[in-house]
Amino acid sequence: MTGTLLSIDGLTKAYPGVIANDDVSFDIREGEVHALLGENGAGKSTLVKMIYGLVKPDEGHMRLNGSPYAPAAPHAARASGVAMVFQHFSLFEALDVAENIALGMESPPPMRDLAKRIREVSELYGLPLDPTRTVGELSAGERQRVEIIRCLLQEPRLLIMDEPTSVLTPQEVEILFETLRKLRDEGVAILYISHKLEEIRALCDHATILRLGKKVATCTPSETTARELAEMMVGSTLQSPESAPHAAGDVVLELDRLSVASPSQFGTSLRDLSLELRMGEVLGIGGVAGNGQDELLAALSGEIRSAKGALRLKGRNIGPLGPIARRRMGLLSAPEERLGHAAAPDMSLTENAMLTGAQREGLVRHGLLQWGKARSFAEAIIERFDVRTPGAGTVARALSGGNLQKFVIGREVMQRPEVLIVNQPTWGVDASAAAAIRQALLDLASQGAAVLVISQDLDELMEISDRFGALNEGRLSEIRPARGLSVEEVGLMMGGAHGMEVAHV
């Protein structure tokens, strides 16, 4: 590492009801990977938006390479050598890789020259990409490569990465880390945001920790334990999830050779899925993104009606039933995409509580919506799940991703489901909130509910699951007891070691 690349001095940004950043100061040096850590709502997103020109600070200033730096928009940041890979990809599925990359460039070269450059840069950094492939055909990891290569073509001096490993397999994570270390060795500075603390310890040279908008600590991650990092973030002792002793009960949900066509041209159809879910257990379903996870949740929730095979809830065929009828029977769900699918962005938290809680919480009487009861329900979710928000009248899109996730999961858990299906329950959520969500799922199972957790976080699944299976190309592996499974066995299951029989415990 050499000199300071970006100096941040006293940055402050306030919104109605909250100070997102309060007098934040720190330096990012050339040739270092610098972690930015904090709970959901701690101010990380606002800070990087100011660095990238999406938000203008109220107070404070920045210097880049020793010169004043105040980008009025992202194109100004990019022109100054600052690039960003966002947590949510901004790609058009019907276009090919080169076309998507061209759309993100100020003055793209001719497509033939761009395709050649994409091949050269992607091979140089160990992230090979075919510029002619349609993005809709790519895996989640390959789509992330598109975003990264688009940034690298700008030859950035500072690369900001927001939750870059949330959709990657362990093998893809290591490939990404090799790329980031190569960039670091070339003098590029990387500002790295992640809730995966062991990754922070393995990759990052320094860390700045935010809490409630303020910088509260700096440290060297390799010399700090993951628990110490988490406790600096939350300001208190971190409690690990614990499961009360309980035995699995009767089968409550059964899939028997279920096949469902994906409604998306670029989705993954489900093929001959069989499993039994019992009362009082947590069944974990792993897999790399894009192998049928969204379709599985949609098939179980009723958003997609089953086309072939049997789907039974408490012995009753529910294949033809829609989501509302299944909810009445006690089968609730929380999809992966929280903003737009699990929650309506421009509706308040009260209105979003009404959307799925109307039947089970008695929020409708004689055809009239009971808004007072809906608000009380929303406030109860906010309190129990520590959702950081000015109040129940706040619109969903105003919450940080992690706080909205806590609200979405809390909304379903508090409706006392008999069966709960959740996809990526702690995606983009900090260590403290993730522990609280996992504890809520374990508590639900200990009270007799059946819980099916679809997740790409293998550590999460091994921590809370009683049994485990993996999706690969729309097919399900054998369901096995989670305790005692090795990483190698899990990898084989994720890689396509399919089991066609129902596993009984």
Image: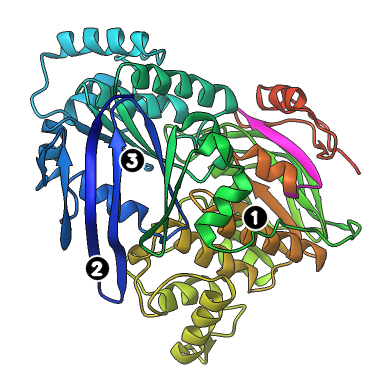
Taken as a whole, is the magenta stretch helix, strand or loop? strand
* Relative side of 215 to 296, left or right: left
Q: Along the polypeptide, which appears first: circle 1 or circle 3?
A: 3
Can residue 298 be seen by looking at this rendering? Answer: no
* Relative side of 247 to 268, left or right: right
- Name the amino acid type tagged 1: Ile
Q: Secondary structure at mark 3?
A: loop
Residue underneath mark 1: 421
Tell me if residue 298 comes above or below residue 333 in the rendering: above
Q: Which of the 4 image quarters holds residue 116? A: top left
Residue underneath mark 2: 14
Label ID, residue 86? 3
Quarter placement of the C terminus: top right
The crowding category of the residue bearing disc 1, from other C-alpha atoms within 10 Å (few below 14, some 14 to 19, many at least 20), is many
Start and end of the magenta stretch? 464-472
**Residue at 62% of width from left, 33% of height from top?**
287
